[in-house]
Image (cartoon, rainbow, N blue to C red):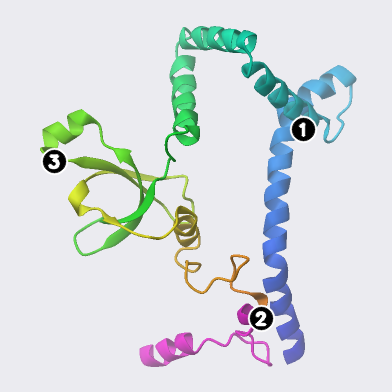
Amino acid sequence: MRHLRRFFLTGIIVTMPAAATIYALWLVFSFLDQLAGQAVGLFLGRRVPGLGLALTLAVVLIAGFLATNFIGRFFLNLWDEVMYRIPLVNSIYRTVKQLVEAIWRDDKKAFQHVVMVEYPRRGIYSLGFLTGPAPAEASMRAASDLVNVFVPTTPNPTSGFLLLVPREEVIPLEMPVEDGLKLIISAGVVGPAGRTASGGAGWGRLLQGLTANGTINNPGWRRSRNTAE
């Protein structure tokens, strides 16, 4: 029974990354396939799995090809003018376009550096990303050189808080942006220290936490539990 429990826990640890990856890819596939899959299904009279994804990718490639020449850019600018004239649609379109431009602009990355700021109060530090200088009006009214710092939430880094922080109160870190995102998504479990060349902790080290009787071997957890008792 102990060996069966150990095999079961080991199987969960080994298959969880692959299962999560397959599930995420399936969600992306389903979303892209549904973008044009319903229209194709109405035209053909039946749903063909994967055809909507192929059509969506074809439309994206054709749009990218047309946008690289003069005629395509003319129609692209004309499309922008039409979208900007439609109420409610123009605000959504303009916001998404500005966000895409900020992420893909050539002169700098959206997340420049990993930094620490004292947030939500003094003495407590939060991990954030420097995204650029704050608006000039904000710096003028605050009488300080402010910078934009985005503090993501855990484990979903797509949401968070935009803080306007004085430049002298921002603590820059040498940590790469990728490692900062890993640290936030994993709630501090996965960090820049102790990584292998593949970016993980290694299966051998990970499975060392399982004892022969199928229980979790964590001395730190046991010590804290005994102290609490």
* Residue at 77% from the left image edge and 21% from the top image edge: 39
Residue position marked by numbered label 3 in the rendering: 144
Alpha carbon separation for disc pair 1 and 3: 50 Å
Tally of numbered tags: 3
Alpha carbon separation for disc pair 3 and 2: 51 Å
Q: Residue 59 location, x and y as percent?
A: 72, 23
Residue position marked by numbered label 1 in the rendering: 53
Q: Residue 71 location, x and y as percent?
A: 63, 8
Dots 3, 2 in contact, CB < 8 A? no
**Outermost residue to the left:** 143
Foreground mark, 1 or 2?
2
Residue position marked by numbered label 2 in the rendering: 204
Name the amino acid, label 3. Answer: Ser
Q: Residue 17 location, x and y as percent?
A: 67, 63
* Residue at 49% from the left image edge and 20% from the top image edge: 93
Q: Earlier in the sequence, mark 1 or mark 2?
A: 1
Q: Which residues are magenta?
A: 204-229
Secondary structure at numbered mark 1: helix
Residue 193 seen: yes
Q: Earlier in the sequence, mark 3 or mark 2?
A: 3
Q: Nearer the viewer, residue 95 or 58?
A: 58
Q: Nearer the viewer, residue 131 or 68?
A: 68
Q: Earlier in the sequence, mark 1 or mark 3?
A: 1
Q: Residue 70 location, x and y as percent?
A: 61, 10
Task: Characterize the local packing of mark 2: few (<14), some (14-19) or many (20 or more) Cα atoms within 10 angstroms.
Answer: few
